[in-house]
Structure formats: C-alpha cells, structure tokens
Amino acid sequence: MQRNFADRETLALAVLSQEAEILKNNLDLSRPFYESLKVAVIQAMPTLAMYQHIAAELSRAETGRTALARLGDEVSAFLTPLVSAAKSRGEVSETISAHDFAIYMQMAASVLHVGMSDEEIDTNLDVAMRILTLGTQPR
C-alpha cells in the first residue's frame, strides 16, 4: 500500500472518493427525490460513518482540509442532477443546493449504525428524513 499511497491521508481520501463514485453510479434520477435520497443514505451509511472519523483526523492539517473540501465538491457535483430533477418536479425548494443535500445525507445517516436491523434502519431513517425534510420542501 505504501507504493500506491504516499500517506494515510491519500489512502483515506482514495477510499472515500471510490465510495462516492459508487454512490454516484447508483443514483436513479427517475425515482422520487426523497426515495432516491433514502436509498443513497442507506447505501452510504458505512462510508458516511467512516467519513466522520477520517474528517476529524484530516481536518487537523491544512492539506487535509483542502482535500476534504475537494471531496465535498465531488459529492455536490454528482448530487446536482438529482437536486435539479427534484426542483423541476417541485419536490424541493428552489433555494436548496446540492451541498445542502450532502449535509442532509450526513445528518440523516447519523441516526444509523452498522448492526441495526433493516426495520430499525428504515424506522430511524424515516423519522430523521421527515424532520430534515420539513426545512427543504417548497413553502
């Protein structure tokens, strides 16, 4: 691994970037927005949990903060078509951005953990998304 990655930061960011690419490839723009987002949060749950630990470690250095910002930009870029489709269908407010939904996904995933049953995941995520969604819907 040391031949392919200069340091732990590079390895961690490569893993997160690969997981973001998988998530991007699994997004279905034809589904209702919140259904797509729920599926994405469930699929990304282990990655989002890992992200919190990696971000805490990497944010201590300027290079780590810069790399995390780039990764955040990648996630926002692949969420943009999903958010645009939802806006065109009137499912979300025009003021909501893809970056907002990247944060939304992190917040929603925070109620989940590996080891939960499918029923627990579904219940906790439904509650979290219902609460979060109140602030994203058109008024």
Image: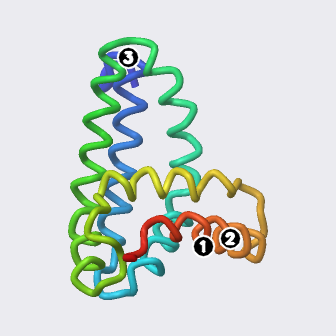
Disc 3 secondary structure class: loop
Of labels 1 and 3, earlier in sequence is 3
Vertical arrangement, residue 27 with respect to residue 80, above or below: below
Residue assigned mark 2: 127
Q: What's the amino acid at mark 2?
A: Val
Q: Residues within 10 Å of mark 1 (few under 14, many from 20)?
A: few
Compare residues 9 and 131 and report the one nearer the observer. 131
Which residue in the structure is indicated by mark 1?
130
Query: Looking at the picture, how far across and down is residue 44, in whole percent?
Result: 50, 58
Q: Does residue 92 sit above or below 6 in this rendering?
A: below
Is the C terminus in the top left, top right, bottom left or bottom right quadrant?
Answer: bottom left
Identify the residue shown where x is 28% and y is 58%. Answer: 97
**Residue at disc 1, secondary structure:** helix
Q: 95 or 109, which is in the foreground?
A: 95
Q: Disc 3, disc 2: CB below 8 Å?
A: no
Q: Residue furthest front?
A: 139
